[in-house]
Amino acid sequence: MTDRTEERPTGIDNTTGHEWDGIRELNNPLPKWWLYVFYATVVFSIVWSVLYPSVPGLNSYFAGVLGYTQRDEVAADIARAAAGQAAFRQKIRELDVAAVKADPELNRFSVAGGRVLFAENCAACHQAGGTGAPGYPSLADDDWLWGGTPADIEHTISVGIRGQHDETRQSQMPRFLADGMLTAPEVEAVVDHVLSLTGKAPANEKGAQIFAEQCASCHGEDGSGNRELGAPNLADQIWLYGGDRAAVRQTVAYSRNGVMPAWAGRLDEASIRMLAVYVHALGGGE
């Protein structure tokens, strides 16, 4: 058997004595440049920890010799931005929303600021760009439950829909099947009639009669809706909760009562007005 301790690679005379499967661990010194860089990083970290906030304590932290903190820098940036916007926001508060839109400079400022406000507060439900989702209306088309003028939009944003505000938008559709107002076959007949308004089902005489008796007072005889009541147009191929038979049946039988929060009190007057201008600019405003 060969003595493995006598087998040393040519030119290598410094090992740690550790060997695994014939592989010896060398004990060569680290390159000087690497050591110098390592020592420099150690010194740099110590100096940095002394100058800037670093070591945490039980209730606070070492603030550093310079007393620097990015929180103060960010707060100063925000204060400078707010000061720069103050004049614009004051003008927006003093004018009605139509006048804000009519002023090119204020309109540009409102659209830019409203885009940020929308992303922070509204996009979670209405999606980016106001494209909407099932149960959350699109704000980029020309179909409006409560009106699409800048003033209408501002009022809706301010007071919400079926919310806690004293002036919130209110509408209540009956639960025709759940409350026993219609039987299941009668509900099916009404569903047929509603679908027939957009060519998705043949006309149903019985459904038309029930619709005239139970639904037309809000939705109109032709199903075109009523914005004063928040009753949607049923004949325009635009559906808030879906336009297939199952979705329409669910709506007729059990109703839908979505809620939008009132933003008055959460956002200031200028922010709400800027939001209204931005929403109106999405393309579906009147």
Image (cartoon, rainbow, N blue to C red):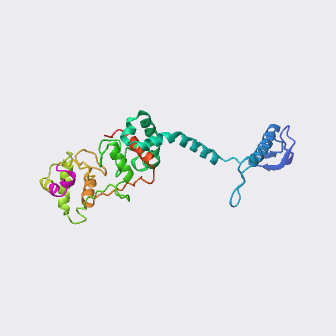
Residue 3 seen: no
Q: Residue furthest top?
A: 104
Q: Residue at x 32, y 54 (%)?
A: 169
Q: Quick check: 60 above or below 65?
A: below
The image quarter in which residue 248 lies: bottom left
Q: Main secondary structure of the magenta part?
A: helix
Depth check: give the residue in front, 107 or 35: 107
Percent from the top left, x then y, of residue 91?
45, 40
Query: In the image, 50: left or right of 152?
Result: right
The image quarter in which residue 273 lies: top left
What is the quadrant of the C terminus in the image? top left
How many marks are shown on the rendered structure?
Answer: 0
Q: Residue furthest front?
A: 94
> Where does the magenta region start and end?
210-221
Magenta highlight on residue 140: no
Q: Residue furthest bottom?
A: 180
Query: In the image, 210: left or right of 107?
Result: left
The image quarter in which residue 33 lies: top right
Q: Quick check: 207 above or below 8?
A: below
Query: In the image, 45: left or right of 140?
Result: right
Q: Residue at x 73, y 46 (%)?
A: 66
Percent from the top left, x then y, of residue 170?
30, 56
Percent from the top left, x then y, of residue 43?
79, 44
Depth check: give the residue in front, 158 or 136: 158
Q: Residue at x 57, y 44 (%)?
A: 79
Percent from the top left, x then y, of residue 85?
51, 40
Depth check: give the residue in front, 268 or 256: 268
Magenta highlight on residue 219: yes
Query: In the image, 240: left or right of 126?
Result: left
